[in-house]
Amino acid sequence: MSPLQSYRHLFGLTGPTYVVIAFLARLPLAMSQLGVLLLVATATGSYGAGGASAGALAIANAVGAPLWGSLADRVGQRPVVLVQSIGGALGLAGLLATVHSGAPWGFAAATSAVAGFLLPQVGPLARVRWRPITARTGAHQPRLVATAFSYEGAADEASFVLGPALIGLGVSAAAAVLALFGAWFALDPTARLTDAARASRLGVTGRLLTPALVVLCLCQLVIGTVFGSVQTGTSVIATAAGQPGLTGYFHALLGVGSVVAGLGMAAVPARFSLPARLRWFALALLVLAVPLLLVGSLATLAPVLLVLGFSVAPYMITTFMLGARVTPAARTGAAMTLLAAATGLGYALGAAIAGRLADWGGHTPAFAVTVSAGALATLVSWSAGRVLRGADVPAPEAEPTDSPEGPSEALATVRDSAEAASLSSGAADSGARAGLSSHT
């Protein structure tokens, strides 16, 4: 299949409603970090308090993500994501109440940590669903799974472009979006597919922290460092130019290039092995980051960030695809959320180091952290080739289950829901609600 045919076939398995829901459900996480920083900083008059609160949210989310992912592997995504969505929305509402109560900022930081711990990592959990969704596509499954991971990588990047841009709507908007679309994502019929696949693996466990997965977590830690240092360096150069409000827009350029490249990953031939892709994409990350050291104005920064983004999504998509390959099927949720958690920790690390260096020497030392991260990504991916090479083995096609509603029946339900959603101008919502009520 061509890339366009692959995307058409893939989205035809679920219908457009699920794709939209899964995208919107991941926006609150992208909105929350910057939203919390601005909320607390505005209320207290201290960017230090805002940064500490945003950092508390990010770290708590990184700690909680693999725990929730592991729980989803054991009991299913539906109850776990539903609890996280409602709990996370209440946590963000509690943060608003705490900030407006006039309590010391330490209470806001603590409430931010609670909210961050509860916020769901929708992107990684959506990746888990695609393998059972494509389980009955025969010889097309490997191509469709690769296309799905390409799409999810691009969707994650798009959410972190759009999310900060929407933060003007406020943290309350993030809470409302999470409560609605997070719960909808949890209850979507595709969640039944992961339950059916999980039922077929009852009693089957495996080691999660293999050497290969540890390497991939380090790779994601590095790319998170790129994000944190780029945002810090961009903020410094924008502030020096008297335009601090442009920081988010310029940082979004990194995501724009990444989205385009991520969608194009569906065209990469299967003979280009995943370990080889990781090595070359890491090298591209390093090469494209070097021009940041020559940037002296916002005008020269814009094209450099846009071009650098073309290496980001391919690198991340490859690490997540390898993560799915090296992990036992029963632990995929934990693996995907662990990789996402490593990215969040890397972001905090990159922002902290770049911030210290920026205080000393401006934007160039901050961007030097980005280049150093690219060098580390290259070193890790090339030196760990032997560890990762054995992981590049196509996953077996999902097998039928003896559960009352196996993948075939559940997939038919998803298709029926998708068809029902297009019957009338208002049926997109009513059909989806009917599908939810019939499965809850």
Image: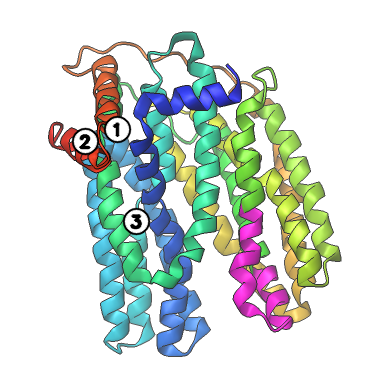
40 on left or right of 249: left
Residue at mark 2 to residue at mark 1: CA–CA distance:
8 Å
Q: Which x, y percent locates residue 267?
A: 65, 26
127 on left or right of 269: left
Residue drawn at x 25%, y 72% as measured from the top left? 94
Q: Is residue 6 above or below residue 249?
A: above
Q: Which residue is mark 1?
A: 422
Q: Which residue is mark 2?
A: 431
Residue drawn at x 41%, y 20% as measured from the top left? 134
Q: Is residue 402 magenta?
A: no
Residue at mark 3 to residue at mark 2: CA–CA distance:
27 Å
Q: Which numbered marker is on residue 119?
A: 3
Dot 2 falls on a residue whose secondary structure is: helix
Q: Is residue 235 magenta?
A: yes
Circle 2 residues within 10 Å: few <14, some 14–19, many ≥20: many
Q: Which x, y percent locates residue 11?
A: 43, 29
Numbered range of the magenta stretch: 232-255
Q: CB of mark 2 within 8 Å of CB of mark 1?
A: yes
Type of amino acid at the residue the image marks with label 3? Leu
Q: CB of mark 3 within 8 Å of CB of mark 2?
A: no
Type of amino acid at the residue the image marks with label 2? Gly
